[in-house]
């Protein structure tokens, strides 16, 4: 087994929202990948997940990257920037070189690094005209940086399966349990490690929703998810302000 330690770095995507364990904590694709790698590597395999929902790129770089490097893992996943492109303060000119330098730093220690081109989440959200070009820029940069530094690229954007709403949670922003399983399967495929075939199975598309019912659903979504998000932006708060990393220390991992 090539990897005996794995550290996951990022935001809610990597923390595992909205794929819950029975106790309400989040599992997500990174835990699923760690489960499979641990089964291959044996009891000495170590896993840490430093990701925290709502974190912006500068916070991830300042807080999580040094901690990940200090653990000297064989494998690091890095997924960041998704929260940044949703904000009007996003500065592409400073983001692009900073992203490149961070990946160079992660690779300099000898670890393999997994990067992601993000799926098209804007297909279900308002603000496409403003945000979609930023997502496109982020995905382009990720692809170029992965090639430049020899990182392992997982291209979720190229997978039209993620247009299926069943792979997304009710907030339309985070993956469902089925979505996280599919990401885990694609990560493992990129690593050359087999996985449970069910992880890559896609639920059937839901039946078309009548126009009036769809508008009612939009209104419920706006009240339950969009309005709280806007309130946090206006007050300078984040959904992760009171959240700590679920696995801050590199240690043995079991899915039990």
Image (tube, rainbow, N blue to C red):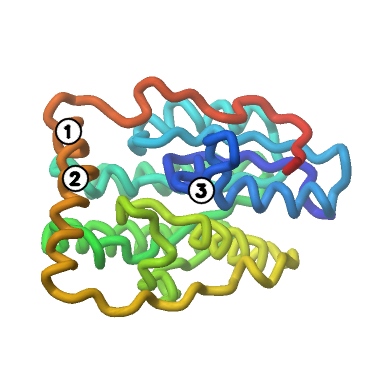
Residue at x 54%, y 35% (from the top left corner): 25
According to the picture, the residue beneath numbered tag 2 turns out to be 226
Q: Are marks 1 and 3 in contact (CB under 8 Å)?
A: no
Eye-nearest disc, 1 or 3: 3
Task: Work out whether mark 1 precedes mark 3 in sequence or the reverse, and give the earlier one.
Answer: 3
- What SS does tag 2 mark? helix
From the top left corner, tell me how far across and down residue 204 is, in percent.
Answer: 46, 77
Residue at x 64%, y 34% (from the top left corner): 48
Is any atom of residue 101 visible in this view?
Answer: yes
Label 2 CA crowd tier, 10 Å (few <14, some 14–19, many 20+): some
Label 3 CA crowd tier, 10 Å (few <14, some 14–19, many 20+): many
Task: Work out whether mark 2 precedes mark 3 in sequence or the reverse, and give the earlier one.
Answer: 3
> Taking 120 as reference, is 102 above or below it?
above
- What SS does tag 1 mark? helix
From the top left corner, tell me how far across and down residue 162 is, in percent.
Answer: 41, 70
> Taking 83 as reference, is 193 above or below it?
below
Where, quadrant-wise, is the N terminus in this rendering?
A: bottom right
According to the picture, the residue beneath numbered tag 1 turns out to be 233
Which one is nearer the viewer's eye here, 173 or 136? 173
From the top left corner, tell me how far across and down residue 134 is, in percent.
Answer: 23, 57
Which image quadrant for residue 170? bottom left
Label 1 CA crowd tier, 10 Å (few <14, some 14–19, many 20+): few
CA gap between label 1 and label 3 equals 24 Å
Give the left or right position of residue 115, taking residue 251 as reference. left
Give the left or right position of residue 187, taking residue 54 as reference. right
Eye-nearest disc, 2 or 1: 2
- What SS does tag 3 mark? loop
Is any atom of residue 148 visible in this view?
Answer: no
According to the picture, the residue beneath numbered tag 3 turns out to be 19
> Taking 161 as reference, is 86 above or below it?
above
Q: Are marks 2 and 1 in contact (CB under 8 Å)?
A: no
């Amino acid at each position: 087994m090539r990897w005996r330690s794995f550290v996951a770095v990022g935001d809610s995507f990597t923390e595992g929202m909205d794929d819950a364990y029975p106790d309400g904590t989040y599992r997500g694709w990174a835990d699923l990948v760690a489960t499979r790698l641990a089964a291959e590597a044996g009891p000495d395999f170590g896993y840490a997940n430093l990701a925290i929902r709502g974190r912006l790129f500068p916070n991830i770089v300042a807080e999580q990257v040094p901690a990940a490097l200090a653990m000297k893992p064989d494998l690091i996943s890095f997924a960041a920037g998704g929260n940044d492109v949703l904000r009007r303060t996003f500065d592409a000119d400073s983001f692009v070189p900073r992203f490149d330098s961070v990946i160079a730093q992660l690779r300099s220690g000898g670890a393999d690094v997994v990067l992601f081109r993000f799926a098209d989440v804007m297909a279900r959200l308002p603000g496409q005209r403003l945000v979609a070009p930023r997502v496109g820029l982020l995905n382009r940069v990720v692809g170029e940086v992965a090639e430049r530094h020899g990182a392992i690229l997982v291209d979720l954007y190229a997978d039209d399966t993620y247009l299926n709403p069943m792979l997304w949670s009710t907030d339309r922003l985070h993956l469902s349990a089925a979505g996280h399983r599919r990401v885990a399967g694609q990560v493992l495929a990129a690593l050359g490690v087999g996985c449970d075939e069910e992880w890559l199975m896609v639920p059937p598309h839901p039946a078309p929703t009548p126009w009036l019912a769809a508008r009612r659903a939009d209104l419920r979504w706006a009240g339950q998810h969009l309005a709280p998000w806007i309130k946090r932006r206006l007050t300078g708060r984040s959904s992760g302000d009171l959240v700590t990393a679920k696995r801050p220390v590199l240690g043995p991992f079991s899915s039990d």
